[in-house]
Amino acid sequence: MVHFIKYLIYLFLGSLIISCSPTRDLAVKSTFSFMYDSQDYQIISINSPQGDGMNFLTKTDENTIKLKCLDQDQDGILELIQYGNLDINEANMIYNYGLQKALESGKYRNKDGLRKFEHIQNDTLFVVETMGSYIDQVYNIFTITDLNSNNRTAFIDQDSDGALDIREKGIMELKMAQSLYDNILQTGIQEAEIFFKREKYIVKFNTIDRSS
């Protein structure tokens, strides 16, 4: 009755084996390099075959680490500055810029959008999709589709705070849609597909297609 999409960030450029265990248990380290404000940065992604992983934003100068930040659950937001004197908000701006550049360069292969959570119940498809590149600029699109008639209603949560602001399409009343939205957000949180961080509800990055 319920279909969930598993989300994670997976960089595949420059994949390197970093484990000495049997092949099926190997972890993979991948690196994407980019420039921000004339400075060189790297996003390093480490992923296990089981789907667990973490990302790092790093900056080095003459083989010396100047910055190392951690995205411990690969949700697109840095939680910790491990080394360096950069502010966490500024680090996240650089990190999200790098993620966007990786996407534009084809260094991400993804299915069905970047941040999308789907839930089917009683012949109705509910979708929450987070749009935007920076944590302070994201918004959510909430769609409700009757799978029998294919009628679709869409609403906008302008700042991802959990409150619907605008009806984009359809005739459903905002109050009714808000009640459904509340339930879907909580379902997503329970399934670890939606997280609440910095007063915003944000869908995790979608599963990356590793087939090629």
Image: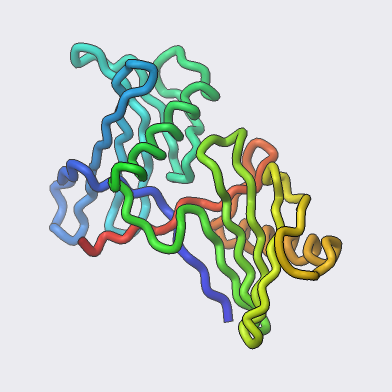
Against 201, is 55 above or below? above
**In the figure, 121 relative to 48: above or below?**
below
Q: Residue at x 29, y 47 (%)?
A: 106
**x, y percentage for residue 157?**
71, 50
Residue 169 visible? The answer is yes
Q: Which image quadrant is residue 65 in?
A: top left
Depth check: 153 or 13 in front?
153
As rendered, which of 87 and 149 lies closer to the eye? Answer: 149
| Residue visible at 60% across and 41% down in the picture | 138
- Up-down relation of residue 60 to residue 115 (above or below): above
User: Can residue 18 be seen at all in this image of the molecule?
Assistant: no
**What colouring does the structure picture have?**
rainbow
Q: Residue at point 80% right, 69% down?
A: 172
The quadrant in which the C terminus is found is bottom left
Q: Between 12 and 144, which is closer to the camera in this rendering?
A: 144
Q: How many marks?
A: 0
The location of residue 178, given as percent across then percent down, is: 79, 60
At horizontal 41% and vertical 52% (from top left) the residue drawn is 8
Based on the displayed image, in which of its 4 quarters is residue 84 positioned? Answer: top left
Residue 135 as seen in the image, left or right of residue 146: left
Looking at the image, the residue that sits furthest to the bottom is: 148
Side of 190 relative to 54 (left or right): right
The residue closer to the viewer here, 41 or 69, is 41
Viewed as shown, does residue 17 lie left or right of 71? left
**Residue 186 picture location, percent across and down:** 68, 59
204 relative position to 55: left or right? right
Assign the N terminus to one quadrant of the image.
bottom right
Q: Is residue 129 above or below residue 92?
A: below
The x, y position of residue 70, in whole percent, is: 42, 32
